[in-house]
Amino acid sequence: MIFRISEEADGRLRMMAKRLSGKGGYDLGELKAQRDRVLTSDEQGRFRKALTSLDDVLVGPADDCVVVMDGDQLILERTSAGQYVVGQRVWEEGQPMAGMSALLSGFAGWGR
């Protein structure tokens, strides 16, 4: 799954999401579903709160050379104070990045 949250000129947040078939390996798989919509004000508030909770994750160094053979690898990129910030972690139940993944999957209507 790929999620992109961008801020519109009027301040609203737009989510663009794509989900592949999950048949990876050497084949990229096929596009199974996609969403493109403006988040509701409630969803925007929940996303901003979740993003703030990741501040500790995003200030640490990104995982180096992580290869995920079976599971999810989460990469969160953003700009903050004009600087590029990246957080990259292997998905782990109960960890902050897992919460973000579940939140965005829910916004797309895909669940986790």
Image (tube, helix red, strand yellow):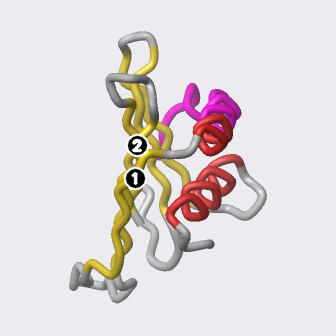
- Where disc 1 sits, the SS reads strand
Query: Image point 64% across, 61% down: which residue?
Result: 102
Using the image as rendered, state which of residue 88 and residue 79 is in the foreground: 79
Query: Which quadrant is home to the C terminus?
Result: bottom right
Mark 1, Cα crowd under 10 Å, few <14 / some 14-19 / many 20+, is few
For residue 90, side relative to residue 66 (left or right): right
Q: Are marks 2 and 1 in contact (CB under 8 Å)?
A: yes
Q: Compared with residue 38, is residue 27 higher up or lower down, i.e. above or below?
A: below
- Residue type pointed to by label 1: Arg
Query: Image point 58% across, 57% down: which residue?
Result: 101
Residue receiving disc 1 = 37
Residue receiving disc 2 = 14
The stretch of residues the image draws in magenta is 48-65
- Residue type pointed to by label 2: Arg
Which SS type dominates the magenta stretch?
helix
Q: Compared with residue 11, is residue 97 higher up or lower down, i.e. above or below?
A: below
